[in-house]
Amino acid sequence: MDGSSLDALDARLLLLLADEPRLGVLECARRLGVARGTVQARLDRLSAQRVVRGFPPDIEPGSLGYTLTAFAVLEIAQGQREHVADALAAIDEVCEVHATTGQGDLFVRMVARSNDDLQRVIDTVVDVAGVRRTSTSIALSTPVPPRIRPLLERIARR
């Protein structure tokens, strides 16, 4: 599903759930001024189309002791993307991996408890068969955290 197929009601529903993820369908319907069945049908459709991927709590890694965030650009052997991605997914501290264009092949976000722990994580990543080279940067702060809200607000104004 592309963003153009979301309408203003979809966006308003998603904004409501982003602000209050524990809200029930009935309360969403009340606040949006639509029928309960409308909200349920839209949530079902948005979930089936993978617009909504779930409702887990958004947990700050620092609260689990992982206060250091780093990003690595990996150059990998040709034809090894799937294997390397699977191996990276098996490393607990690897939070996300993106296939990219440009100098590297994969962009990896990882967390660690300290600089020494980050070295251990990087060593684990470098040991993955197919990884040829890495370049790692430590995040000092996150002035703009991951967000979708501005995009939803734009759609909600349509």
Image (cartoon, grey):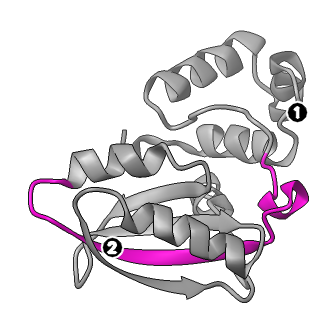
Q: Is residue 158 visible?
A: no
Q: Quadrant of the N terminus?
A: top left
N-terminal of the pair, mark 1 or mark 2, is 1
**Image: 115 above or below 43:** below
Q: Which mark is residue 17?
A: none
> Residue 16's quadrant in the figure?
top right
**Image: 83 above or below 155:** above
* Residue farthest along the left direction in this orientation: 78
The residue depicted at 60 percent of the width and 48 percent of the height is 92
**Image: 95 above or below 40:** below
Closer to the eye: label 1 or 2: 2
The residue depicted at 62 percent of the width and 56 percent of the height is 93
- Left or right placement of residue 88 versus residue 71 in this view: left
Query: What residue span does the magenta drawing correspond to?
Result: 58-80
Residue under label 2? 74
Q: Quadrant of the C terminus?
A: bottom right
- Left or right placement of residue 41 versus residue 82 in this view: right
How many residues crowd around disc 2 within 10 Å: few (fewer than 14), some, or many (20 or more)?
many
How many residues crowd around disc 1 within 10 Å: few (fewer than 14), some, or many (20 or more)?
few
The residue depicted at 84 percent of the width and 48 percent of the height is 19
- Left or right placement of residue 42 versus residue 18 in this view: left
Q: Is residue 151 magenta?
A: no
Residue under label 1? 31
Q: Position of residue 42 (x, y in %)?
A: 59, 23
Q: Is residue 74 visible?
A: yes
Amino acid on which disc 1 is placed: Arg
* CA gap, disc 1 and disc 2: 46 Å
Q: Position of residue 157 (x, y in %)?
A: 63, 58
Q: Is residue 73 magenta?
A: yes
Q: Position of residue 32 (x, y in %)?
A: 80, 33
**Kind of element beneath mark 2:** strand
Foreground pick, 78 / 60: 78
